[in-house]
Image (spheres, grey):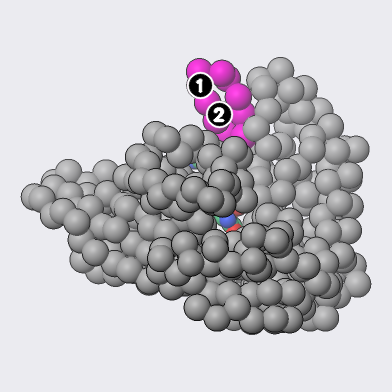
């Protein structure tokens, strides 16, 4: 473990923003983190744990604290039964490598979450969600080190229910925010059996693609390939375009608010979110589009041409500019629809 000074984070965040960290350290196993906790650099500085850097906006040119890069690599099958498998994965592992490997091994349950970049660390943190599947459905437990009491670090392994998963949210973004270092995530995946396979194909883009190729046998690999193709057609290739993906969460509103909005504009796209509370999920990207902010460019930053929810750095943009653009979007959508868009991306 080596603590370095004045390290540029440009290659560690997918917006490629040039923020310099006063201190930087990479951690490759839990005992290194426990060692780090004993150092003055850890005790006396503001801390920020960095995963894949794909869901952060570095708003300043300098971070006057210590950045701790999670590089814990680990993959272990803990249990393999006739119907399911339990796999423990290091929080620093690349998520898509893990997803692809699981699909190749004929496990199911994870295929709709294919092609989401970067690492396992963010999976429970954000309760990753795509195409009707959320991470909480496949997470069995999460292991972390609680560093809120520096003298008495606690290593915890908690089950799914303790993570308080909600729509793109979890305990790690709420009461445990900036208090824990996630070391491992354990997934429970089912083994594919053609007679019992019920793919999640409720999203229109997937069902439309399946209708056009009815002769194909539906397998987890086919669903993964369809999702990969849909994502590639709508979302920027992060190797070429600098972005953190969706910038805002889709807002959840009560039925009364939904009815007012639909009355005003019947084109507004919404899905029943929770039948128990009759809440509706609105499409944040559409609200931005309807506010005429699709494909705009402000300074060196903007919204992506194929997806208004995706903010991009065209090159040379700054965190301040991206933040100003996000605030402009928030205020325009609020003026038009009375809705405050909440960032999904973590602002640092
Ligand atoms: P889309 O499929 O046209 O979906 C538009 C919106 O409607 C999304 O906000 C989605 O909510 C919702 N939706 C569509 N069909 C639904 C259904 N059957 N049940 C419930 N909600 C439904 O367009 P999209 O924006 O490209 O999204 C496709 C998927 O990729 C979504 O799951 C989205 O979350 C995911 N995505 C993630 C990122 C990221 O960076 N995190 C970026 C782009 C897209 P949800 O978003 O809640 O699914």
Q: Position of residue 159 (x, y in %)?
A: 35, 40
Q: Position of residue 71 (x, y in %)?
A: 47, 72
Q: Which residue: 27% across, 49% down?
A: 188
For disc 2, the neighbor class at 10 Å (few under 14, some 14 to 19, many from 20) is some
Q: Main secondary structure of the magenta part?
A: strand
Query: Picture quarter containing residue 66?
Result: bottom right
Q: Which residue: 71% across, 18% down?
A: 256
Residue 213 in view of the camera: no
Query: Picture quarter containing residue 326?
Result: bottom right
Q: Which residue: 68% across, 55% down?
A: 346
Q: Along the line of sight, which residue is nearer the eye, 164 or 314? A: 164
Which residue in the protein does label 2 denote? Answer: 272
Q: Which residue: 23% across, 53% down?
A: 86
* Disc number placed over residue 246 in the picture, else none: none
80 vs 330, left or right, is: left
Identify the image quadrant of the C terminus. Answer: bottom right
Mark 1, secondary structure of its residue: loop
Q: Along the line of sight, which residue is nearer the eye, 346 or 158? A: 158
User: Which portion, as a residue range, is magenta?
Assistant: 270-281
Mark 2, secondary structure of its residue: strand
With respect to residue 122, does 275 lie above or below? above
Q: Position of residue 241 (x, y in %)?
A: 67, 77
Q: Are marks 1 and 2 in contact (CB under 8 Å)?
A: yes
- Residue 277 is one of the magenta-drawn residues: yes
Mark 2 residue CB less than 8 A from any atom of ligand 1:
no
């Amino acid at each position: 473990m080596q603590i370095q000074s004045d390290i540029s984070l440009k290659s560690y965040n997918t917006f490629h923003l040039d923020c310099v960290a006063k201190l930087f350290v990479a951690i490759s196993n839990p005992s290194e983190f426990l060692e780090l906790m004993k150092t003055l650099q850890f005790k006396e500085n503001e801390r920020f744990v960095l995963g894949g850097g794909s869901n952060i906006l570095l708003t300043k040119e300098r971070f006057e604290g210590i950045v701790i890069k999670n590089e814990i690599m680990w993959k272990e099958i803990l249990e393999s039964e006739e119907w399911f498998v339990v796999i423990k994965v290091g929080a620093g592992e690349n998520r898509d490598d893990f997803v692809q490997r699981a699909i190749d091994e004929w496990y199911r349950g994870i295929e709709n979450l294919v092609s989401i970049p970067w690492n396992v660390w963010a999976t429970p943190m954000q309760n990753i969600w795509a195409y009707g599947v959320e991470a909480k459905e496949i997470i069995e437990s999460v292991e972390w080190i609680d560093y809120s009491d520096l003298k008495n670090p606690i290593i915890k392994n908690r089950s799914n229910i303790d993570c308080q998963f909600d729509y793109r949210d979890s305990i790690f973004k709420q009461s445990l925010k900036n208090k824990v270092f996630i070391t491992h995530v354990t997934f429970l995946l089912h083994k594919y059996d053609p007679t019992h396979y019920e793919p999640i194909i409720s999203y229109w883009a997937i069902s439309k693609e399946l209708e056009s190729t009815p002769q194909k046998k539906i397998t987890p690999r086919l669903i993964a390939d369809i999702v990969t193709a849909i994502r590639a057609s709508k979302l920027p290739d992060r190797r070429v375009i600098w972005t953190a993906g969706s910038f805002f969460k889709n807002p959840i509103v009560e039925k009364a608010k939904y009815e007012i909005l639909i009355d005003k504009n019947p084109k507004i796209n919404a899905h029943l979110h929770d039948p128990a509370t009759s809440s509706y999920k609105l499409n944040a990207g559409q609200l931005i589009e309807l506010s005429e902010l699709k494909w705009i460019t402000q300074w060196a930053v903007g919204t992506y041409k194929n997806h208004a929810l995706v903010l991009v750095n065209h090159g040379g943009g700054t965190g301040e500019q991206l933040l100003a653009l996000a605030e402009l979007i928030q205020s325009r959508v609020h003026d038009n629809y009375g809705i405050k868009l909440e960032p999904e991306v973590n602002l640092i």
